[in-house]
Image (cartoon, rainbow, N blue to C red):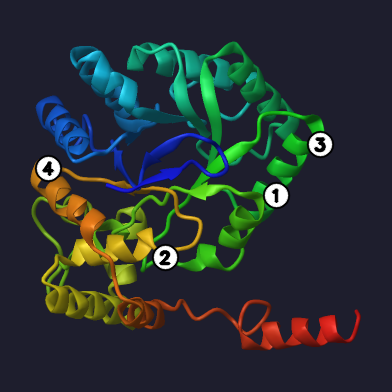
Amino acid sequence: MEYRNLGRSGCAVSALALGTMTFGAESDEACSHAQLDRFVEAGGTFIDTADVYSAGVSEEIVGRWLAARPAAVRDQVVIATKGRFPMGAGPNDAGLSRRHLDRALNASLRRLGVDCVDLYQVHAWDPLTPVEETLRFLDDAVRQGRIHYVGLSNYTAWQIQKTVDIADFRGLARPVTLQPQYSLMSREIEWEIVPACRAEGLGLLPWSPLGGGWLTGKYRRDQRPAGATRLGENPDRGVEAFDRRGAVERTWAIVDEVRAVAEERGASMAQVALAWLLDRPAVTSVILGARTVGQLEDNLGAAELRLSEAESARLDKVSDPGAADYPYGVLGLEQRGRNIRGGR
């Protein structure tokens, strides 16, 4: 297992992280604990959860696992959680206000059974709360020893830049990571979000690295999903909606190319997709989300797989999202080049 720093911080984490959104939902407690044990056995140290995962049950499962393990194990793992979304029905039970985040963080600490969370991430932007209020709470929490580092999740480039600039100007704890959706299927963050993170030193923690299961090869053009898959349970679910993504030819071109590389390397499709993501600029740790120990075992194989430049280039080409000419595509680049050369 490779280890990388959380952005510009001095904290090292495993290049593969164990996501726990399935804990308490698709994975019961015994299965969840087995996943955690296998992950740590493989050299994994980074565990990511959130208060809204299974309405707090995911954090509780991780907390009971931590409590039952030796101090040597507890001391090695780096725990990340998130706050932002509703955990109640009241008007102050959501958002990034000091009031909500203080209660959310305290509740997460109780469920996890710890005094301090290593990485506390705001789960999404809040247009109603001043950024200064959120950052001052997070800075206070760092000073109080309740969290070690601050992270962002699901932010756009301008939101990242504004947050970092205000933190720097006010001398407050600076975010060290961003957790975005990122995979061969979803590369649009490369237009502005990745450059913003690289410029400001934020490490990327990609979620849904297998595109909701598309990059595992389980879906076929002529067969609607069924059975024990998220798509089978709910074919209209969010980013995984089969009718929407399956109707796009690019989807199947990516799947076919990942399958071809996997067959040539004697690896699984998931391992190839994860290996590609591990080599992307600014990526600190890729978050795995497994329902079973078997799925996790296969995903962990990506830690030992290194794609060649030619293989990565093939995957880059077929997964190119095809940005519009302006301002991201060829026309935009040419126009910006002319403006720079012309002094405007």
Q: Amino acid at mark 4?
A: Thr
Whole-number angstrom distance, CA of label 1 to CA of label 2: 21 Å
Residue at position x 15%, y 79% in the image: 264
Q: Amino acid at mark 1?
A: Gln
Contact between marks 1 and 2 (CB within 8 A): the answer is no
Percent across and percent down for residue 272 are 24, 67
Q: Which numbered mark, 3 or 1, is in the foreground of this view? A: 3
Query: Looking at this view, is 261 or 11 the one in front?
Result: 11
Contact between marks 3 and 2 (CB within 8 A): the answer is no
SS under mark 1: helix
Query: Looking at this view, is 229 or 78 the one in front?
Result: 78
Q: Earlier in the sequence, mark 1 or mark 2?
A: 1
Can residue 211 be seen?
Answer: yes
Percent across and percent down for residue 224 are 15, 68
Left or right for 287, reference 166:
left
Residue beneath label 3, please? 169
Left or right for 104, reference 330:
left
Q: Which residue reaches farthest right?
A: 343
Residue beneath label 2, please? 186
Q: Amino acid at mark 3?
A: Phe
Whole-number angstrom distance, CA of label 1 to CA of label 4: 38 Å
Residue at position x 25%, y 54% in the image: 303
Crowding around mark 1 (Cα neighbors within 10 Å: few <14, some 14 to 19, many 20+) is some
Whole-number angstrom distance, CA of label 3 to CA of label 1: 12 Å
Contact between marks 3 and 1 (CB within 8 A): the answer is no
Q: Earlier in the sequence, mark 3 or mark 4?
A: 3
Which mark, by number, is residue 56? none
Which mark, by number, is residue 292? 4
Residue at position x 22%, y 57% in the image: 304
